Amino acid sequence: MKQSIGELKKSTWLSRQEVIQSTILVAIVVAIVAVYVSVIDWGLTGLLGKVVGGH
């Protein structure tokens, strides 16, 4: 346990501002990917509906 604590003390921790910026960046990237996947899904669903003869 002492070794683990010692190793954690050697680690470089991000500042509060860096954590906030990273979190915002991740949220933006996730939103962009979600929109991209949704558009692709919508397009493929429409295409498949035309091919199969659905509505």
Image (cartoon, rainbow, N blue to C red):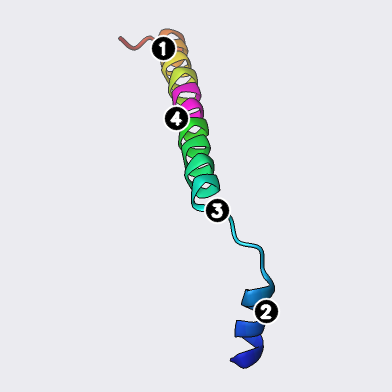
Q: Residue at x 42, y 14 (%)?
A: 52
Mark 4 closeness class: few <14, some 14–19, many ≥20 residues within 10 Å: few
Q: Earlier in the sequence, mark 1 or mark 3?
A: 3
* Quarter placement of the C terminus: top left
Q: In the rendered view, does 45 fall on the left or right side of 10?
A: left
Q: Secondary structure at mark 4?
A: helix
- Where does the image place residue 49, in percent across and percent down from the top left? 40, 13
Residue under pointer 2: 7
Tell me if label 3 and label 2 are in contact, CB under 8 Å: no
Residue at the spot of label 1: 46
* Label 2: how many Cα within 10 Å (few below 14, some 14–19, many 20+): few
Q: CA distance from mark 1 to mark 2?
A: 55 Å
Q: Nearer the viewer, mark 1 or mark 2?
A: 2
Q: Nearer the viewer, mark 3 or mark 2?
A: 3
Looking at the image, residue 3 lies above or below residue 44: below
Mark 4, residue position: 31
Dot 1 or dot 2: first in sequence order is: 2
Magenta span includes 45: no
Tell whether label 2 touches label 1 (CB within 8 Å). no
Query: Which element carries disc 2, helix, strand or loop?
Result: helix
Q: Which label sits in the foreground, 4 or 2?
A: 2
Q: Horizontal placement of 5 versus 23: left or right?
A: right
Residues rendered magenta in the picture: 32-36
Magenta segment, prevailing SS (helix, strand or loop): helix
Say the numbered circle drawn on residue 15: 3
